[in-house]
């Protein structure tokens, strides 16, 4: 939904009704070192060129929005605090403080060109959860990936299996938890070499077919047993260095 208002242009992602929105704190767009914003902010810029702003939802999977902010314009973002994020709203106005009339037909000619540029550049972006991001990363690097749910195995997270066609030992186990604390608790049960897992109810001594590699990031534990350099590099790029394994 894109609408006019006394505070400027309102760009909102239409979602569920009845959610409360929470205004956010203020910064300037000129201070953004990268185009992406973590969550909502307020900003303005004195730069001669427009600034690309990307507003990510607090909790994926959900939609965010990107737009270009002209010189001397201000933006303000509000997001609902539900999981997943159901509503992201961006309000944009001239930094001069001049109000824009509520009807599009009566917008000041001084801002009509800038308004058209903003509206033409608005894009809604889908942000998947961490598993979606992992799948997308491998697909962008030429892998054919299939994902399916699997029965629990040793660790307590919900287990998924990623299978890569045409790759020897091309399987990754993903354990998804309710939050990062639960994932860290299970990660602490895995011995440094990855062959022993000390769960509260039982110690598991595992004989893997190849070298194990364990990664932990936010609510995920990712396990890869193999030596494919491309897979290992992608996992390290996404999740950082492994915490256990060879």
Image: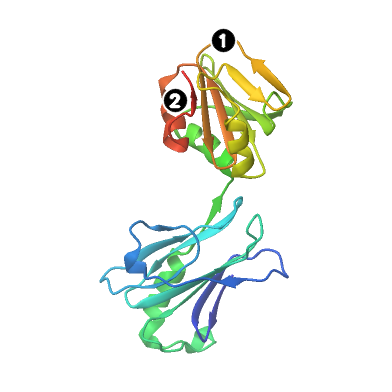
Q: What is the secondary structure assignment of the residue under circle 1?
A: loop
Name the residue furthest left. 48
User: Is 18 in front, or is 118?
Assistant: 18
Return the residue at label 2.
232
Image height check: is 125 above or below 224?
A: below
Left or right for 181, reference 166 = right
Residue 209, labelled with which disc? 1
Q: Residue 215: x, y in percent?
A: 51, 31
On the image, the x and y values in percent for residue 173 come to 60, 26
The foreground one among 230 and 222 is 222
Q: Earlier in the sequence, mark 1 or mark 2?
A: 1
75 versus 35 height, above or below: below
- Checking the image for residue 239, the label placed there is none
Residue in front for this viewpoint, 186 or 1: 186
Residue at horizontal 36%, vertical 68%? 29
Q: Mark 2 Cα within 10 Å, few/some/many (few <14, many 20+)?
A: some
Q: Residue at image x 47%, y 64%?
A: 122
Label 2, secondary structure: give it. helix
Quadrant location, the N terminus: bottom right
Residue at x-position 50% and y-position 65%: 40
Up the image or down, 60 lies above or below 235; here it is below
Judge by depth and name the residue closer to the eye, 124 or 92: 92
Cα gap from disc 1 to disc 2, whole angstroms: 16 Å
Q: Name which quarter of the figure residue 15 lies in.
A: bottom right
Callout 1: few (<14), some (14-19), or many (20+) C-alpha neighbours within 10 Å?
Answer: few
């Amino acid at each position: 939904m894109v609408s006019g208002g006394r505070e400027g242009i309102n760009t909102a992602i239409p979602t569920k009704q009845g959610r409360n929105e929470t205004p956010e704190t203020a910064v300037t767009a000129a201070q953004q070192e990268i185009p992406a914003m973590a969550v909502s902010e307020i900003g303005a810029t004195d730069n001669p060129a427009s600034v690309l702003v990307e507003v990510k939802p607090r909790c994926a999977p959900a939609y965010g929005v990107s737009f270009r902010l002209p010189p001397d314009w201000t933006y303000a973002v509000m997001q609902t605090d539900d999981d997943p994020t159901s509503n992201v709203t961006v309000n944009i106005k001239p930094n001069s403080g001049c109000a824009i009339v509520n009807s599009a037909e009566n917008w000041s000619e001084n801002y009509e060109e800038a308004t058209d540029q903003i509206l033409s550049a608005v894009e809604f972006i889908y942000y998947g959860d961490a598993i979606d991001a992992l799948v997308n990363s491998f697909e962008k690097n030429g892998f054919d990936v299939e994902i399916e749910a699997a029965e629990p195995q040793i660790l307590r997270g919900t287990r998924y299996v990623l299978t890569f066609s045409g790759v020897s030992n091309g399987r990754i186990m993903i354990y998804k938890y309710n939050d990062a604390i639960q994932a860290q608790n299970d990660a602490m049960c895995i011995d440094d070499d990855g062959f022993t897992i000390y769960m509260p109810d039982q110690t598991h001594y595992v004989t893997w077919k190849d070298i194990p590699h364990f990664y932990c990031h936010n609510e995920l534990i990712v396990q890869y047993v193999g030596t494919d350099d491309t897979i290992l590099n992608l996992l390290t790029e996404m999740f950082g260095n492994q915490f256990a394994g060879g």
